[in-house]
Image (cartoon, rainbow, N blue to C red):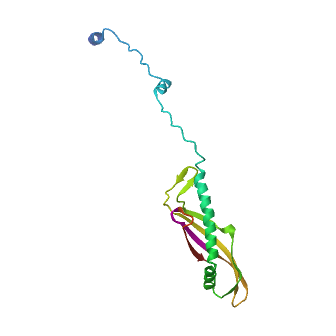
Amino acid sequence: MQAKNGSIIVTVIICAVLLGGFVYMTQPDEVVIPEPVAFPTAAEIAALIVVPAAPAAPEIQDFGVIPGTCRSTLKDIAEIDAIAEVNDEMDDLKDFIEDTIANFDEFVISPILDDSETDITIDELGYCEYWNYEIGDEEDNKEVIIIMEYDFSYENTFTGKEHKDTIYVTAIVEYDEGNFNDKDIELTYSL
């Protein structure tokens, strides 16, 4: 058995010597170790970034109050105009009530505005000036919708009893090109 193993051992040794010689011959003469690469730090990169200076903002009043001031002024003027229009057209309001309620005899208390229930909605703010600033276009219309409640009481024809009720008046107030003197007010009534 040793004779058989001897030739295998000699063959393995010869292959190992040949492999070692091949590896030795393929090695470079001089091993070059690369120098370490210097990566810039975040501070160095940030120092290279140039940020342009922002232009100085002009001094202004509190811009946030412009729409608020314009809105409150518009609401106040529109409410006054709408109430004045209802007062001017009170006969139409009373006629609507008399024609709509069955068995209406006469008013015990004429319609009176309930100020606490007035709802004002600005549909179009339109042009507004505040301090040195302008919002919107001078040709823009202003439009406000005002819903008012008028309380009244009346007497029934058949029973003679007093009944209390409320009529809702919707006023659409439009100011042509924002001119408070050039207004159009449309009134609608509902019970």
For residue 182, side relative to residue 83 (left or right): left
The answer to which quarter of the image holds residue 96 is bottom right
Q: Does 121 lie within the magenta span? A: no
For residue 66, side relative to residue 3 (left or right): right
Q: What residue do we see at 63% from left, 72% from top?
A: 84
Number of numbered discs visible in the structure rendering: 0
Q: Quadrant of the C terminus?
A: bottom right
Vertical side of 57 occupied by 86: above or below: below
Q: Quadrant of the N terminus?
A: top left
**Viewer-proximal residue among 126 and 165:** 126
The answer to which quarter of the image holds residue 170 is bottom right
> What's the magenta region?
169-177
Q: Is the magenta stretch mostly helix, strand or loop?
A: strand
Q: What residue do we see at 69% from left, 78% from top?
A: 152
Q: Does 173 lie within the magenta span? A: yes
x, y percentage for residue 163?
71, 82
For residue 24, side relative to residue 157 (left or right): left
Vertical side of 20 occupied by 82: above or below: below
x, y percentage for residue 93?
62, 79
**Viewer-proximal residue among 153 and 138:** 138
x, y percentage for residue 111?
68, 77
x, y percentage for residue 187?
57, 74
**Viewer-proximal residue among 87 and 16:** 87
Q: What residue do we see at 48% from left, 23% from top?
A: 44
Q: Let me know if residue 118 appears in the view.
A: yes
